[in-house]
Image (spheres, rainbow, N blue to C red):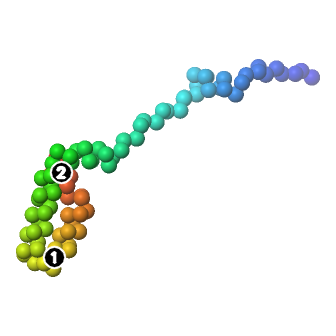
Amino acid sequence: MSTRRVPLTSPLSILSSPLVNPLPVPEPRLDKTLILKQAFEPISEVLSQVEERIRAQARAFDPAIEMYVAYAIESHGKRLRPAL
């Protein structure tokens, strides 16, 4: 009966093998909120003035719709196009 010899290797030596791909290093996560704040910073004062004027026009036109206009303005989704 013959005995087969297996070379002794450490479990970590497998990781240095060229056949094993190393784990990718994750990219640092971008803080999207911070990026948007920085993008809107130069025009934030003007945007506030525009929003206030829209509210005033809604009040003057029909006070009943002021609540709906305020909801639309506060959703902040409408700010992207003016920022571009």
Residue at 12%, 58% in the rendered image: 49
Q: Which mark is residue 10?
A: none
Q: Check disc 2 and report the residue beneath it.
A: 44
N-term-proximal mark, 2 vs 1: 2
Mark 1: give few (<14), some (14-19) or many (20+) Cα within 10 Å: few
Q: Which of these two is toward me, 83 or 6?
A: 83
Q: Is residue 78 above or below residue 64?
A: above
Q: Is residue 48 above or below residue 58?
A: above
Q: Residue 26 at what x, y percent from top left?
A: 46, 36
Q: Is residue 83 above or below residue 20?
A: below
Quadrant in which residue 10 is drawn? top right
Residue at 70%, 28% in the rendered image: 11
Residue at 14%, 61% in the rendered image: 51
Q: Is residue 59 left or right of residue 72?
A: left
Q: Is residue 43 left or right of residue 9?
A: left
Quadrant in which residue 63 is drawn? bottom left
Q: Which mark is residue 65?
A: 1
Q: Residue 77 at what x, y percent from top left?
A: 24, 58
Secondary structure state at the residue bearing disc 1 = helix
Q: CA distance from mark 2 to mark 1?
A: 25 Å
Q: Quadrant of the N terminus?
A: top right
- Which of discs 2 and 1 lies nearer the camera? The answer is 2
Residue at 11%, 72% in the rendered image: 58
Mark 2: give few (<14), some (14-19) or many (20+) Cα within 10 Å: some
Q: Residue 31 at what x, y percent from top left?
A: 36, 44
> Disc 1 residue type?
Ile
> Disc 2 residue type?
Ser
